[in-house]
Every structure is written in structure tokens, then in C-alpha cells.
Amino acid sequence: ETGVTQSPTHLIKTRGQQVTLRCSSQSGHNTVSWYQQALGQGPQFIFQYYREEENGRGNFPPRFSGLQFPNYSSELNVNALELDDSALYLCASSWDRVSEQYFGPGTRLTVT
Amino acid sequence: EDQVTQSPEALRLQEGESSSLNCSYTVSGLRGLFWYRQDPGKGPEFLFTLYSAGEEKEKERLKATLTKKESFLHITAPKPEDSATYLCAVQDPMEYGNKLVFGAGTILRVKS
């Protein structure tokens, strides 16, 4: 059984640019959640997708957007990057909207 | 919003020296409490889910317990490979589905 995968592993962008991060959910999982983890902190919820629809959103501005595809993989897009967007971005998948979430290895984004 | 506080922030143990990590939470109605292990630069690894006061779960040298206001992660006779950050999270309901609200974590170092 393949776990949650994310790409790329690391990314360096310049302030003002746009970035797309990708996530493949674990086999059989139809729900994907995205989190941002700053250094030394716990993950912060960005949003959740269930069957291609946004299911809920945390306290992140609209320049953070996402998609979920028919195969339940997902993308996180961030426009107009700011220095504070530098963080580890984590994707988690689950069997449904309420069961335990399994995380991928993360994408380390550095904004200079 | 639900809040999760973990203590201590960091813990240093000698190999074989048992101890406990604490996770206290404020929620209107607990739907689930989760423990994760996170190695540096990697995604959180799921350990346990607890749903009701009095519940206990065990895995190797780890045992998680739950009361109405807090959870403990007991580590018995730890080994250096148990060194990691341990994260606690509670399920916070949204209109549809649940998100996870995390504590900042406890950094555990076990020396041989």
C-alpha cells in the first residue's frame, strides 16, 4: 500500500512569485487536508478537500488556494509569495472527513 | 477555537529512564485526540487515536492515556531511536468534516 507522497521535496522561490505543491493521497482515501508548519511550531490547518470540493478552511488568505482531482490527488497553490510563507507544507489524507489523517513527508518551501 | 498545550517543550532522558509527556486541551466536546511522532524535516507519523476518558492505547514502549482535560504519552525504558518531536492534536469540527488543531510539540532526546 502506497502512503501519502508529496512533490517537490524542497523549493526555493522569490517573494512575489507563485508556487504549486502536489500531493498524492494514500490508496482508498478520498479526503486531503493541507497544513503549514513553521519552524518549532505545530502544523496549522490550511484547508480540506473531500471529493473535489473544499470542505473547510483555516485562517489563511485567499492567495492560498487548492484543488482536488478525480483520483483524489491534490494541489496547493500560493500566489504573491511572502517571506513568512517559508515553512514545511504538509499534506494529509484520510478515509473520510472525520477519520485519522496520515501525513506525507512534506515540501520545504523557502521564500527569499 | 480549541486549544492544545503540550509540556514540557523539551525533555532529555537517559536511555532506560521512563517519563511522560503531557497534552492539555480545551474543547467544547472531544471528538478525538491524536498523537503523532515527527522526525526532523519529515511529516508526522500517526501513533494513536483516543476518543473517551479512561481509554488507553499501547505501542511498543509508548502508552497513551486520556482524561477529560488532558492526555499523557508515557515512554517506558526509552531508547535513542525514540528521539523525536511528539505532537498532540484534537479534532475540531467544521461545518463539514474535522480539522486537526495541534500543540507545539515536545522535543524528546534520549541519550545512550
Image (cartoon, grey):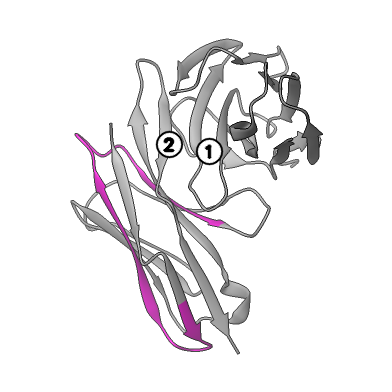
For residue A78, which quarter of the picture? top right
| A109 with respect to A63 (left or right) | right
Pointer 1 residue: A101
User: On the rendered structure, is B77 left or right of B91?
Assistant: right
- Identify the amino acid type marked 2: Leu
In terms of secondary structure, where does tag 1 sit? loop
Q: Position of residue A45 (x, y in %)?
A: 48, 31
Q: Are marks 2 and 1 in contact (CB under 8 Å)?
A: yes
Instruction: Please tell me in which quadrant of the rendered image residue A71 appears.
Output: top right
Tell me which residue sits at (21%, 56%) in the image.
B67
Residue A92 visible to the viewer: no
Which amino acid is tagged 1? Gln
- Is disc 2 in the same subunit as disc 1? no
Q: Quadrant of the N terminus of chain B?
A: top left
Name which residue lies at 28% across and 36% down: B2
State the image coordinates of residue A28 (x, y, percent, origin top left): 65, 29
Q: Which residue is mark 2?
A: B100
- Image quarter hosting the C terminus of chain B: bottom right
Q: Chain of mark 2?
A: B
Determine whether A101 is above or below A28 in the image: below
Please report the residue visible at 81 percent of the width from the left and 35 percent of the height from the top.
A8
Q: Nearer the viewer, residue A107 or B69?
A: A107
Q: Main secondary structure of the magenta part?
A: strand
Q: Nearer the viewer, residue B19 or A21?
A: A21
Residue placed at 47% from the left, 83% from the top? B13
Cα–Cα gap, marks 2 and 1: 9 Å
Vertical position of residue B57 compared to residue A49: above or below: below
Q: Secondary structure at mark 2?
A: strand
Q: Quadrant of residue A104?
A: top right
Describe residue A14's horizontal placement relative to residue A64 as left or right. right
Bounds of the magenta span? B12-37
